[in-house]
Image (cartoon, helix red, strand yellow):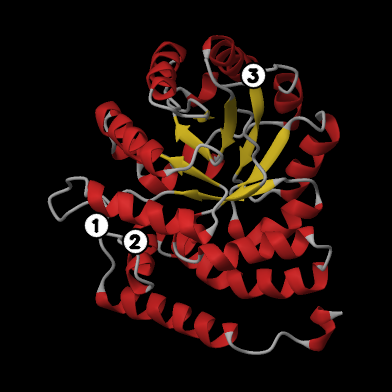
Amino acid sequence: MTHDLSGIFTPVATPFDSDGGIMIDWFDENLERLVAAGIAGFLVSGSQGESPYLSDDEKLLLVKSARKRIPDQRTLIVGAGKESTYHCIRFIRKAADLGADMVLVGTPSYYKPAMNDDALFAYFWSVADESPIPIIVYNIPQYTGVNTSANLIARLSSHENIAGIKESSANIALQAEIRRRTPETFRIVVGSAPTMLSSFIVGACGAIVAIANVLPAESIEVYDTFCSGDWQKAAVLQDRLCSPAAAVTTGFGVPGLKFAMELVGFHGGYARLPLLPLNEEQKAALASIFKNFTAAAVREIPEVAKR
């Protein structure tokens, strides 16, 4: 089956108990609710799933459990980036054996001075050569300190096993340049919810965004409204989503995402140390953001956005 990257994808959170153990039942229940909400695809073991804090065995446990709950016609992506090409390829093969449709491969970053375009090209090209399933390049320089250039992505886009890029830097100019320099078959997926609409306008086909863990229907509505051609209404919906979306990423991070999930009835659980839980003041601030979002959601969309 050929899997698309269009639509809204959830980078699934990994619920932990207070001792740091995975709450697999909670993970499964969250997935079932997200499937029912109409989410197009799922990223397991991504940044919002606390991938750096998971062992390979834990990642594969999540993949195995997710594949049982995600319908075959919806895409399962697995975070598979490693510092070395050798370990990346070997992990991808294990994920593919458990039913992953695609893998998300981030930039190696430990030896930053050596990670120039040539080194990154060799890394991604070699991984794509050996991977049994398509790979997606993952650019998130705010975490890695390594940024992928448009020139690098243009070179990589000629590989038949590199499906696209998840571009999470919120750099709209970079996304537009990548779109201009790559074939239409090369897919751009935005990883920043506050810039979703702008990214769609310059050519992104979908979004993998943290807020879809909390407000899946509202995230889907932005995409569907854009696709319908009603960009004015989409802009209103995007503007309303920006505050909660920023709160669960740049504002309060993964602990904030998990608390917000609890606020709306999902299982957030704890984050793994050294990520600290929110204090009471932070919880109140985040709860207020979502209360204001709910209040705004029941207001009538301005007439200009209906035309």
Residue 161 is marked as: 3
The answer to whether one can see residue 71 in this image is: yes
Q: Indicate which disc, 2 or 3, sits on the residue closer to the N terminus.
A: 3
User: Relative to 286, does residue 109 appear above or below in the rendering?
Assistant: above
Task: Give the quarter of the figure containing the N terminus.
Answer: top right
Marks 2 and 3: which is nearer the front? 3
The answer to whether one can see residue 273 in this image is: no
Q: Where residue 85 appears, x then y in whole percent?
A: 46, 14
Q: Are marks 2 and 1 in contact (CB under 8 Å)?
A: yes
Three-letter amino acid code of the residue under disc 2: Lys
Residue at the image point whose x is 70% and y is 39% from the top:
188
User: Relative to 2, does residue 272 appear above or below in the rendering?
Assistant: below
Q: Nearer the viewer, residue 256 or 33?
A: 33
Q: Quadrant of residue 158?
A: top right
Name the element at disc 1: loop
Q: Where residue 233 appears, x then y in whole percent?
A: 76, 74
**Within 10 Å of the Cα at label 3, are there few (<14), some (14-19), or many (20+) other Cα atoms?**
many
Three-letter amino acid code of the residue under disc 1: Tyr
Residue at the image point whose x is 67% and y is 73% from the top:
237
Judging by the rendered image, the residue that carries numbered circle 1 is 270
